[in-house]
Amino acid sequence: MSGREATGFRQQTDRLYVRLRSLAVAFVCDEHGQDLIEYALLTATIGVAGAAVWAAMGPVIAAAYTTWGTGVNNQWETPDPGAGS
């Protein structure tokens, strides 16, 4: 690279750096969309809490259905085979 090309390249990289820096500052300082982010975080928190509760309730629900099924089966009486004649 010649001296002129190096200077031109340096100017381009300087402009790119300034542009990227200004975009980063604008992104950090801009509050547009803040509500959307807050609602997304709230939804994610509720989803994680729901998944944790669902996982914890699984064995409790299974035990309740097992108890119910056992109670129903114990109430059933086998018919006497000779009673129909």
Image (spheres, rainbow, N blue to C red):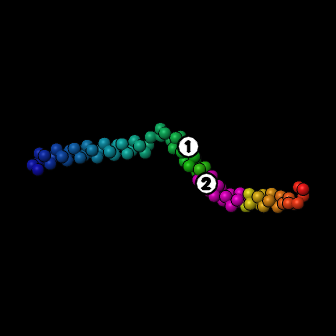
- Viewer-side residue, 64 vs 71: 71
The quarter of the picture where the C terminus appears is bottom right
In this picture, is 47 found above or below 71?
Answer: above
Identity of the residue drawn at 80% across and 57% down: 72
Q: Which residue is mark 2?
A: 51
Looking at the image, is 51 positioned above or below residue 14?
below
Please say whether residue 61 is one of the residues in the magenta stretch: yes
Looking at the rendered structure, the number of numbered marks drawn on it comes to 2
Label 2 secondary element: helix
Q: Which residues are magenta?
A: 48-62
Q: Amino acid at mark 2?
A: Ala
Expressed as whole percent of the image width and height from the top left, the position of residue 15 reads: 25, 43
Q: Residues within 10 Å of mark 1 (few under 14, many from 20)?
A: few
How would you rate the neighbour count of disc 2 (Cα within 10 Å): few for under 14, some for 14-19, many for 20 or more?
few
Comparing 85 with 36, the one in front is: 85
**Amino acid tagged 1:** Tyr
Quarter where residue 18 is shown: top left
The answer, for residue 29, to whether it is visible in the render is yes
